[in-house]
Image: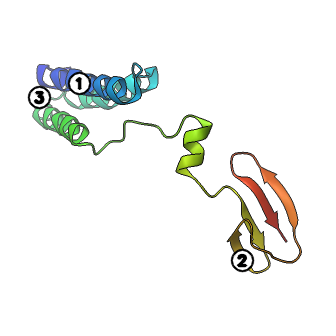
Amino acid sequence: MRGGLLAAWFASLGLTSWRTVSHLHRPPLPSEVVSTLVVFGGLSLISASDQAAPVAAVFGWGVVVAQAMGFFPFTPGPTSAASRAQANPITNIIIGPKGIAPAGTVQSGGTTVVVPGVGTVQGP
């Protein structure tokens, strides 16, 4: 890995660590660190060529700038049951002969199926 690309990788690791510690109050997961290694490791393979090394370094710094501007999400999604319920407030869906409707609406016929993570689903 060349100097400019190595510095970009360290900057990306720093941004990843800072965001997870400041927002999620935990160190970065190993998968988050490995994801930066995969991106910048692939760029280092490209930078083995003398002609492609500047392009790989510019692309690497572009990834860092995009990460700093917030183009890449730093949270994988809701991790607790309470935050999942808050992210998806509609958990009961009725699928019946008249289409899909939120729970609480009355539709004739159908069977009730409980789907883990979704709630109760009523179908024809």
Looking at the image, tell me whether mark 3 or mark 1 is earlier in sequence order: 1
Q: Disc 3 residue type?
A: Asp
| 69 relative to 101, above or below | above
| Cβ atoms under marks 3 and 2 closer than 8 Å | no
Looking at the image, tell me whether mark 3 or mark 2 is earlier in sequence order: 3
- Distance in Å between CA atoms under marks 1 and 2: 50 Å
Can you identify the residue that label 1 sits on? 9
Quadrant of the image occupied by residue 71:
top left
- Residue 8 horizontal/vertical position (percent): 18, 26
Q: Nearer the viewer, mark 3 or mark 1?
A: 1
- Distance in Å between CA atoms under marks 3 and 2: 60 Å
Quadrant of the image occupied by residue 11:
top left
The answer to whether 34 appears left or right of 100 in the picture is left
Q: Disc 2 residue type?
A: Gly
- Residue 51 horizontal/vertical position (percent): 11, 34
Can you identify the residue that label 3 sits on? 50
Q: Disc 1 residue type?
A: Trp
- The disc placed on residue 99 is 2
Q: Secondary structure at mark 2?
A: strand
Mark 1 is surrounded, within 10 Å at the Cα level, by few (under 14), some (14 to 19) or many (20 or more) other residues, namely many
- Residue 120 horizontal/vertical position (percent): 77, 56
Q: Residue at x 37, y 36 (%)?
A: 74
- Residue in front for this viewpoint, 67 or 26: 26
Q: Residue at x 23, y 32 (%)?
A: 46
| Cβ atoms under marks 3 and 1 closer than 8 Å | no
- Distance in Å between CA atoms under marks 3 and 1: 19 Å
- Residue in front for this viewpoint, 54 or 70: 70
- Residue in front for this viewpoint, 1 or 76: 76
The answer to whether 63 appears left or right of 90 in the picture is left
